[in-house]
Amino acid sequence: MEIISENKAFGGRHIRYRHHSEMTHCEMTFAVFLPPFASKDNPVPVLYWLSGLTCTDENFMQKAGAMKWAADLGLAIVAPDTSPRGDNVPDDENGDYDFGLGAGFYVDASEAPWQQHYQMYSYVTEELPALIETALPVTRERAISGHSMGGHGALVIGLRQPNRFVSVSAFSPIANPMSCPWGEKALSAYLGDDKSKWQQYDASWLISQKQHTIPVLIEQGTSDQFLKEQLKPERLLNAAQQSDTPITLNMHEGYDHSYFFIATFIRSHLEFHASHLGIL
Amino acid sequence: MEIISENKAFGGRHIRYRHHSEMTHCEMTFAVFLPPFASKDNPVPVLYWLSGLTCTDENFMQKAGAMKWAADLGLAIVAPDTSPRGDNVPDDENGDYDFGLGAGFYVDASEAPWQQHYQMYSYVTEELPALIETALPVTRERAISGHSMGGHGALVIGLRQPNRFVSVSAFSPIANPMSCPWGEKALSAYLGDDKSKWQQYDASWLISQKQHTIPVLIEQGTSDQFLKEQLKPERLLNAAQQSDTPITLNMHEGYDHSYFFIATFIRSHLEFHASHLGIL
């Protein structure tokens, strides 16, 4: 793990790292915020934040205004990149923003040419936590959140791995990727045409299958330009009712898909996770 | 005034505008944050924020985390661009970041080819407030702040125009541009070789000349990579002692020149200005 840069912020530290990933077979970049007083003798729990299409580790750290609240709560934040990157990593043939680089969709790809590098599900759930928990002053208490494509990733991971993540939240998630243009494009390419393989990466399908007990909190703006065609939170809500799974979905009049929306409500998500992580 | 984009944020509105400027003879872009409940019947005071080298209206609005506090205080924020822009606007011959586009230094240029467009002092102090006070639900109560080159701009404007701005603050300002590389390059080109013309754009010179009464608040990180060669806050402090002008300069151990530093301390600056604007 090599440090790219470090900034003091809110009494804590924002550090960007580069490392070679065994799972994505390339160099990966991620960012960490460590709150004040985090140390080997005082390790802190971690919120993983998964970003949306086109983002890197930087968007959330720079734009969400989350560090203030994380510093107050004693919570670390880890922001991975949104895909493998590098000259050898294949990209969308047209260079579109919604597939390939910056658009890993947090799946383990099975199809060529994607399967060698696009293993973001395993990277985010296994390799990255193991690395962080070895190298940094954090506990093994984890929560997960994200935005848009990252909201999809967080929900899928939280629903599938409640033993590894104590709570899950999302802003404007792609709630039913099996039936929206972004999701259909990505899942068919990364996973092939057999839609039964897509189900494990679809929060609405996952939540419909059984009653889940992991706490779930979602924010959605009503003026989000992607709400009707891509995000479809009503599908998740219907599926949760079907399985009698309690979820909280807050609709916010007039808010859009931007980081201004995230910044407005991020405090409540950090407090939600902090309460389940036992630090609030 | 044409709206480029609008986002709801913290119950208020972030709006980017484009307009033709009479003073800079080009299209200018700026951003406004209007707090909740600002209306013609309930106009709010304005904090002008001047950004640093390479910035536009976007950096502060996206990265400073200021909207939360401005919303709570009932304070509008206006972030102008850092220079004139456009195909007809001359730029540094080498395209360097520290002069020309993105580097107007908040002066009224007198020298060719800069004088036609680079009139940022008049634009920021006269044209922009007049426009905003006509079109938006704001009062004529104004404060001013900024970062780096914009901290220089804010200090110069506040010291020269205490009747138009009730308080002034700065993060990591270029405190003595007459004798640092950034300032010498810009002032010699925009204003010519006669250094007596530079004095009106040098906060340390201005503050040395007489006792000023406008409240002045400055933050500076000790790990700022530009501290010793470019910023030189000790010059300002010495000049203020010379004229018996009260200023507050807070030095912060380990903080750098980034927006992470600004975000950490911006709340105290908004509260400082709010108290002088009579809303706190």
Image (cartoon, coloured by chain):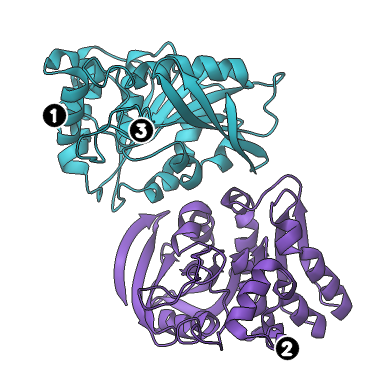
Chain colours: A purple, B cyan
Q: Residue at x 77, y 54 (%)?
A: A251
**Mark 2 — residue?**
A196
Labels 1 & 2 near each other (Cβ < 8 A): no
What is the CA distance from the residue labelled 3 to the residue labelled 2?
58 Å
Residue identified by numbered label 1: B179
SS of the residue under disc 3:
strand
Mark 2, secondary structure of its residue = helix
Lateral position of residue A189 relative to residue A215, left or right:
left
Task: State the residue position of label 3.
Answer: B170
Residue A206: tell me if it is visible: yes
What is the secondary structure assignment of the residue under circle 1? helix
Q: Quadrant of the C terminus of chain B?
A: top right
Q: Is residue A276 visible?
A: no
Q: Is residue B224 above or below residue A153?
A: above
The chain ID associated with circle 3 is B
Quarter in which the N terminus of chain B is drawn: top right
Disc 3 + disc 2, Cβ < 8 Å = no
Give the vertical position of A210 relative to B247 (above or below).
below
The residue nearer to you, when weighing A32 against A60, is: A60
Mark 2 belongs to which amino acid? Ser
Task: Using the rendered view, name the quadrant where residue A34 is placed.
Answer: bottom left
Please, what is the three-letter code of the amino acid marked with disc 3? Ala
Badge 2 density bin: few <14, some 14–19, many ≥20, Cα 10 Å: few
Circle 1 chain: B
Query: Residue B56 lies in what quarter of the image?
Result: top left
First of labels 3, 1 by sequence position: 3
**Kind of residue at badge 1:** Ser
Q: Nearer the viewer, residue B163 or A280?
A: B163
Residue nearest the observer in this picture, B83 or A96: A96
Image point 55% across, 21% down: which residue? Answer: B278
The answer to whether tags 3 and 1 share a subunit is: yes
